Image (cartoon, rainbow, N blue to C red):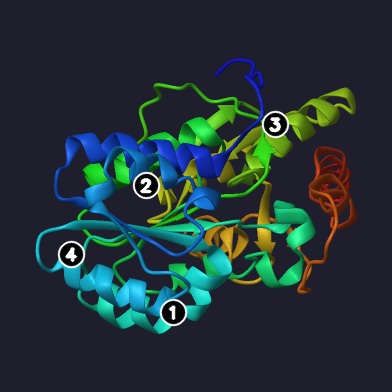
C-alpha cells in the first residue's frame, strides 16, 4: 500500500471497451451485441478490430439480452453493453430468466452508472442497478474503481467467471490511479490504505473520493482505512470482517441509492458476522438531476470533502 497518484483522467467505459477488444483477440468465439450506443460504451474498439463478430441490434435491449443467452447456449461468449438504466431495468426480465436462470456466460456492461453521468439527468443515471442485479441468483457484479481496473475486471470476468457477469462503470473521465497491468481477482476486495479509527469501504468512482477524503481526515486526526470493494457479488466477507475487527467502525460510500447497494451488502455481512457501528453514504432515496458531475457530487455529498465531513462526524459520535 502506497500513495495513489492520478495518472490522468480517463472514463471507465473506455477501460471496459479496451478489455473487450483485447479479449476478442484471445477468444475467437467472443461476440459483441451493440445497442445503438457502441462508441458511448467503448465497444467501437471491438467493432473496428472484429467487424464480423459485431452485431448491431439498435435500441432493443430486451431482445439483445435474450439473443445473448441463446448465443451463450451455443458456446459463444456474448458481450453486450448499454446504459445501466436500460440494462438493469428495461431488460431485467430477460436477464433474470434467459441469462441468470440458465446460468449462462454473458458479460453485461452497465454503463453511465451513478450521479456523475451529469447533464443526462435522472432518466439516465443508474442509481438502483446494484440493488436489482445483486438480488439475482448466479450473477457476478463488478464495480471497478477506474479505467485501468475496468479493463482488468473485464478481462478477468471473461477469463475467470463461468456464469453471467454485470460490470458497472461510468461516463465521465475520472482519476486513473490503479496499475495498468494489475492482477484482478474476482471476489477479492483491496485495502488501499491502512487505518485504525474507521474503515471507509467504497466502490466504483467513490474509491478515489474515499482516498482523497482520508487525506482530509488525517489533518483532523482521524486515521482512516480505505477499502476498495470492486466485486459486490460475491462480496469479500472475510476482508469485511477483518477490517471491522481492526477499526470497529465502518462507513460505506457509493454512487447508488442508500437502499440495496454496497452499504446494504456490507451490512448483511457484518450484522451476521461481526456487528459494528455503520454509516451508509450514497444517494438519499431520491432521483438525481442535470448538472456537471462536480456540481452533483457536491450537492449530494459524494465528493471527498463531503465524505470526510460525514466520516469525521460519525467517528466523533463514539469519542468519550
Asked whether 261 or 171 is in front, the reply is 171
Cα distance in 3D space between marks 1 and 4:
18 Å
Do the residues under discs 2 and 1 have CB atoms within 8 angstroms?
no
Cα distance in 3D space between marks 1 and 3:
34 Å
On residue 211, which mark appears? Answer: 3
Q: What secondary structure is marked by label 2?
A: loop
How many residues crowd around disc 1 within 10 Å: few (fewer than 14), some, or many (20 or more)?
A: many
Residue 59 rendering spot, x and y as whole percentages: 48, 73
Question: What residue is shown with label 2?
Answer: 187
How many residues crowd around disc 3 within 10 Å: few (fewer than 14), some, or many (20 or more)?
A: many
Q: What secondary structure is marked by label 3?
A: helix
Picture layout, residue 175 above or below residue 311: above
Cα distance in 3D space between marks 4 and 2:
23 Å
Asked whether 57 or 116 is in front, the reply is 57
How many residues crowd around disc 4 within 10 Å: few (fewer than 14), some, or many (20 or more)?
A: many
On residue 92, which mark appears? Answer: 1
Residue shown at 81% from the left, 44% from the top: 303
Residue shown at 39% from the left, 21% from the top: 181
Amino acid at each position: 500500500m502506497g500513495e495513489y497518484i492520478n495518472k490522468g483522467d480517463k472514463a471507465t467505459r473506455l477501460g471496459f471497451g479496451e478489455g473487450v477488444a483485447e479479449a476478442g483477440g484471445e477468444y475467437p468465439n467472443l461476440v459483441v451485441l451493440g445497442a445503438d450506443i457502441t462508441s458511448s460504451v467503448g465497444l467501437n474498439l471491438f467493432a473496428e478490430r472484429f467487424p464480423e463478430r459485431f452485431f448491431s441490434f439498435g435500441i432493443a435491449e430486451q431482445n439483445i439480452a435474450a439473443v445473448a443467452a441463446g448465443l451463450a447456449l451455443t458456446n459463444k461468449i456474448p458481450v453486450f453493453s448499454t446504459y445501466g438504466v436500460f440494462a438493469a431495468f428495461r431488460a431485467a426480465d430477460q436477464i433474470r430468466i434467459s441469462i441468470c436462470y440458465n446460468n449462462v456466460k454473458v458479460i453485461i456492461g452497465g454503463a453511465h452508472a451513478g450521479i456523475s453521468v451529469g447533464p443526462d439527468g435522472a432518466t439516465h443515471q443508474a442509481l438502483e442497478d446494484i440493488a436489482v442485479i445483486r438480488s439475482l441468483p448466479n450473477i457476478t457484479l463488478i464495480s471497478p474503481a477506474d479505467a485501468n481496473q475496468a479493463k482488468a475486471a473485464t478481462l478477468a470476468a471473461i477469463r475467470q467467471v463461468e456464469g453471467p457477469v454485470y460490470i458497472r462503470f461510468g461516463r465521465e473521465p475520472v482519476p486513473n490511479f490503479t496499475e495498468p497491468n494489475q492482477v484482478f481477482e474476482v471476489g477479492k476486495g483491496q485495502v488501499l490504505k491502512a487505518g485504525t479509527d474507521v474503515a471507509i469501504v467504497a466502490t466504483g468512482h467513490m474509491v478515489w473520493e474515499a482516498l482523497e477524503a482520508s487525506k482530509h481526515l488525517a489533518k483532523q486526526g482521524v486515521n482512516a482505512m480505505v477499502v476498495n470493494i470492486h466485486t459486490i457479488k460475491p462480496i469479500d466477507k472475510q476482508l469485511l470482517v477483518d477490517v471491522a475487527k481492526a477499526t470497529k467502525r465502518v462507513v460505506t460510500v457509493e454512487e447508488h441509492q442508500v437502499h440495496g447497494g454496497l452499504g446494504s451488502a456490507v451490512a448483511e455481512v457484518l450484522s451476521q458476522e461481526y456487528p459494528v457501528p455503520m454509516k451508509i453514504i450514497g444517494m438519499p432515496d431520491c432521483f438525481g438531476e442535470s448538472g456537471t458531475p462536480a456540481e452533483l457530487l457536491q450537492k449530494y455529498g459524494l465528493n471527498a470533502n463531503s465524505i470526510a465531513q460525514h466520516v469525521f462526524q460519525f467517528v466523533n459520535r463514539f469519542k468519550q
